[in-house]
Image (cartoon, coloured by chain):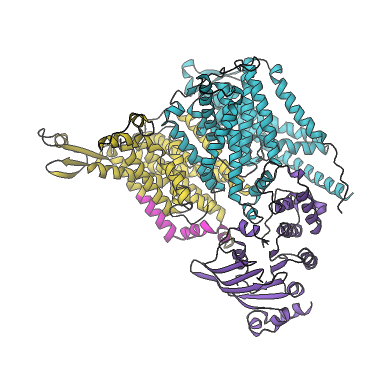
Chain colours: A cyan, B yellow, C purple
Amino acid sequence: MSSTFKFKPYNVGRWVIWSLFAIVLIFAPLVFTSNLSGTMLAQMGIAIIACLSYNMLLGQGGMLSFGHAVYTGLGSFVAIHALNSITGGQSNIPVSLIPLVGGIAGIGFAVLFGYVTTKKAGTPFAMITLGVAELVFAMSLMFSEFFGGEAGISGNRVAGQAFMGITFGPQIQIYYLIAIYTFVCVALMYAFTQTPLGRILNAVRDNPERVEFIGYNTQRVRYLAFIIAGFFAGISGGLGALNFEIVTAEVVGAGRSGGYLLFTFLGGATFFFGPIIGGILMVLAFVLLSELTKAWLLYLGLLFLFMVMYAPGGIASLIMMNLRVAAFGKLKQIWVSYLGLFVTAFVALIGAGAMIEMVYHLQLNSALGDTLKFMGVTLNAKGIDSWVGSIFVMITGLGLFEIARRHFMIEWGDIQVDIEKEIKRRETA
Amino acid sequence: MEFFIISMLNGLSYGLLLFMLSSGLTLIFSMMGVLNFAHASFYMIGAYFGYTLTSVIGFWPSLIIAPILVGATGVLFERLSLRKVHKFGHVPELLVTFGLSYIVYELVQLIWGRTAVDFTPPEILRGAAFTLVNHSVNGLQMIWGAAPAEMCKAADASIRLVCTPFPATRGFMMIVALLMLFSLWLLLTKTRIGLVIQAALTHPETVEALGHNVPRVFMLVFGAGTGLAGLAGVIGGSTYVTEPAMAATVGSVIFVVVVVGGMGSLSGAFLASVLIGVIQTFAIAFDYSFVSVAKDMGLNLSDALKNNSVLKLTISQVAPILPYLFLVLILIFRPKGLLGTREG
Amino acid sequence: MSYALELKDLRKNFGKTEIIRGANLAVNAGERVAIIGPNGAGKSTLFNLISGRFGPTSGEILLNGQRIDHKAPYEINRMGLSRSFQITNIFPKLSVFENLRCAVLWSLGYKYTFLKFLSGLKDANELAEKYMEMIRLDKKRDLLAMNLTYAEQRALEIGITIAGGSNVILLDEPTAGMSKSETTRFISLIKEVTVGKTLLTVEHDMGVVFGLADKIAVVVYGEVIAFDTPEAVRSNARVQEAYLGSHVADEQAGGH
């Protein structure tokens, strides 16, 4: 029964979310005032744009790329050369538009490499992106005029004419420039998901063959999405060039590409806001976690592995699942099980962490003696009781975790059944 | 002349090493649809296991035991991790192996340190397998083993004498690779389990419906593939260098090999491995650039062209990107790969 | 006046095996044709050839007088031919409404645009709603396609096929796997939604065939051995010998 009169209430929820986002962007540096926070917030904006552009390929298009850093990195290089041309007086682009130069470079390289890359899909696509990434990285050592060799290319973002007294010298000024770009890019990328091309891209992800039979050239769809993702990647790179004022070859390296993949997936590729979480985590991990422990990459790899196996939708999907449980009022039932899970996991982690830290200590810091501090406890890396103690703690933690996990799964399953029943009830009511 | 022969042999040996790795990768991909991103990591583990075991039980026993240990590791990974994500599709499987490569890299550095370790081949392999002596008067001679010093010194200034040894390690690598190739071929074509594997390569569900335990076959194939990588690791690690970066250097090349050869084609992988191995070995040896060749030919280039950084590049400097250039060209002109039949 | 769909000496080999061995067919606009034949006769292969999933080894396929052999599936679809699949081929993670909306986008000329919002495309949204009601899935508008029942997914499959507004529709075993009552409902649905269009459907259920089709094409061993009205085909000796020569088929047909 179609209704000729449609009532469309003003979508309040949408305005609230975007306003909150803008407010957080504006007020964050006023809440977190230290220098470290300043640089971290700037980097978060850059990472958010990069991860969202990556997810345009992964989450929305089903295209797993191992070489996204090529587009952010080349965007950075072009941007810093443009910046230097302002300093050198050869052009007078305003500094605030340099990221757009990066974006255009991103488009250019995506048009160039994307043609060959999007000829295939799935696993071959992934390997082609890997090959192109290695190609570009290897070339970075060959063309030292563009890539600057070992030292990279430096620049000075205080260049050209100051705009209303804004020189972009101080960290706070560059932060707000990044914040504006972040807000606009996130909004544009969200808007893309609501367009015909965006939706057909999803269809290509779900069933590439069927798309051909409803009149669309699947390869063309992928190529266009690749180019648009390259645009935003280039903007992210351009912002990075302005922020750090130096660009080295590692920005096109495999490590950076791997990082985008890891953190976008961790944040959650199946929801739009997942990569935003991923970008924030990426900066937190690289800046803070790496200071905390030398084994951070190992922990990250293990976390990633567990996410793929047990929560492939990432943190975003975990949040959404629990929001759904909360919406049906069932969160109270399960929070005790959650507590049990977290405590036992924490215990197991402490045991494993102690052992890993002791091995690192033996490897790298043995000159400093055999003892190290771990979570307030002094451990002897060569002492047998430290080792036995750690192993015992870890195994106990693992055992208890397994018990807690089984209990949790049963409760979770029961709750899901209850929720399904409730949904059916509401449908027929 | 001897330069050509030795370079050819070096190239072939490198190509055969690449094939040892890419054959395991192709088998695993063909059968399970999983592209094992961590395949080069198993290569690295093989080298490190070989290194540790050699210091305990000697090189020759560890040549047998290290690959078995690596294969066992592969089986364990398949059982505990890979199998769990099989139901999610091929992308999560690829991601899981990607995560494993990170973990292995960190664990290796954790246990064995960040610098290269000294994994030396056994006494018998340390010298030259044979030496080519090019005497400008007497011509080309081949001598088994290393040539004695007097043979390599010219009697007087008018005679040109060049001694080019061919390392025994490389020769050993070729022998092992060819033996492995042969036994793989025997296994796949002449044994019953080989028949099952061949069938499961293209129609795993049908094979399962016929009553074969396909998950167990998968596990075995994964273990065999990674064990092969481990064997390549023992040999490659003792011939070249054993360090944490070794997985990355060879990892991307074998993916190129698999795509260029044609995904899922063993013969394609063989062809591509040998091609890429030979081309890269020759390229590294050539120091010619566009500018130097033009100079040799007597062409007069303008100063701007002479200083152009692209034209100044020698072939040896370009050598690292050749496999990837090859990849791009194949994708443009022959997307199925050299001998590929599947679209991937 | 050209035929809506014409096959001229169509051949297809897979390696050394000849699957389609010289198929000839000429369908007038607006006709409803049922394609029947024993298993392995090549019916699905014919559909795959016509819709462009793979190209013929030799021969011609003409749509409204224009050659479509060796064209890509999307080109053929844009020229006015749509097909459904035997194994349900929908977009599992999109909702029912989104599935249908995707199917109408190209025919309304929206192509690859990213400068318009889907919510603002009145014609696309209205068309999607219309088809959703036609296939009786309007109550399940926002349900993800992968959560529908099998019969509902088959209905969505047909919906996606016809939503593009193509004049020539190919349905590959649309009622496969359905119960008797579902089949009956489905057939009346198909009749309703294909009014005025040229329809070719592969079917095994003789009851469906004799109730739905204006003409029957009998495919045996890669050739069309008969193409005529149902009564003529029933009494065709060659057909009886190859396919219908059983008591059971007679009974099935007799019921309708």
Q: Nearer the viewer, residue B275 or A318?
A: B275
Q: Is residue A390 within the magenta segment? A: no
Answer left or right for A107 relative to C112.
Answer: left
Q: Nearer the viewer, residue B237 or B213?
A: B237
Location of the C terminus of chain C (image quadrant): bottom right
Q: Nearer the viewer, residue C174 or A379?
A: C174
> Which quadrant would residue B150 be assigned to in this image?
top left
Q: Residue at x 67, y 24 (%)?
A: A179
Q: Position of residue C226 (x, y in %)?
A: 64, 79
Residue at far right of view: A429
> Which quadrant would residue A231 be assigned to in this image?
top right
Answer left or right for A65 relative to C165.
Answer: left
Location of the N terminus of chain C (image quadrant): bottom right
Q: How would you classify the magenta stretch by its main secondary structure? A: helix
Q: Position of residue B335 (x, y in %)?
A: 48, 51
Answer left or right for B53 relative to A322.
Answer: left
